Image (cartoon, rainbow, N blue to C red):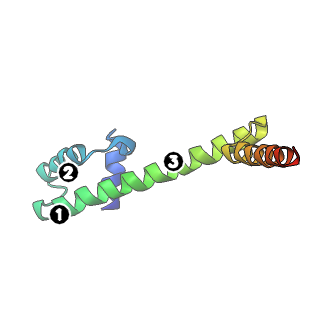
Amino acid sequence: MLNLIKKGMYLGIGLFSLTKEKAERFVDEFIKSGEASLEEKNTLIQNLLDEAQKQKDILEKKINEEIKRAIEKVGIPTRKDIEKLEKKIDELYNKSESKK
């Protein structure tokens, strides 16, 4: 089963953009060539789609981590930083208004 997934990657299926239709075509080719049986079709398709989602999630996590590091390195304020500043500004404004 894992061998089938690896072959799919090597054959250029592109697990990150794998759709159900692509997975079905890919598995159909394996069935035609005798490398898989018709009974395995649904399981193989689901395994391919699950692996594609898993790889996509891993890639997204790594990309997000790298973006976060780059933002911190450059010193760009995050949304959370801006929200904290806005809250402080509101508090200061409210204090100055209450003194009037």
* Relative side of 60 to 38, left or right: right
- Residue 63 locus on image (x, y percent): 57, 44
Who is closer to the viewer here, 50 or 67?
67
Q: Quadrant of the C terminus?
A: top right
Residue drawn at the location 19% of the way across and 49% of the way down:
24
N-term mark: 2 or 1: 2
- Residue 61 locus on image (x, y percent): 55, 51
Which kind of residue does numbered mark 2 sit on? Answer: Val
- Residue 82 locus on image (x, y percent): 72, 42
Q: Kindly identify which residue carries mark 1.
A: 40
Badge 1: residue crowd in 10 Å (few <14, some 14–19, many ≥20): few
Badge 2: residue crowd in 10 Å (few <14, some 14–19, many ≥20): many
Residue drawn at the location 23% of the way across and 56% of the way down:
45
* Cα–Cα gap, marks 2 and 1: 9 Å
Q: Could you say which quadrant of the image residue 73 lies in?
A: top right
* Cα–Cα gap, marks 1 and 3: 28 Å
Q: Could you say which quadrant of the image residue 44 lies in?
A: bottom left
Residue drawn at the location 51% of the way across and 53% of the way down:
58
Q: Kindly identify which residue carries mark 3.
A: 59
In the image, residue 27 above or below residue 47 = above
N-term mark: 2 or 3: 2
Which kind of residue does numbered mark 1 sit on? Answer: Glu
Which kind of residue does numbered mark 3 sit on? Answer: Leu
Who is closer to the viewer here, 16 or 78?
78
Who is closer to the viewer here, 100 or 76?
100
* Cα–Cα gap, marks 2 and 3: 24 Å
Q: Secondary structure at mark 1?
A: helix
Q: Secondary structure at mark 3?
A: helix
The label number, if any, that marks residue 29 in the structure image: none
Asked if the residues shown at circle 2 and circle 1 are in contact, with their CB atoms under 8 angstroms apart, the answer is yes
Q: Kindly identify which residue carries mark 2.
A: 27
Q: Quadrant of the N terminus?
A: bottom left
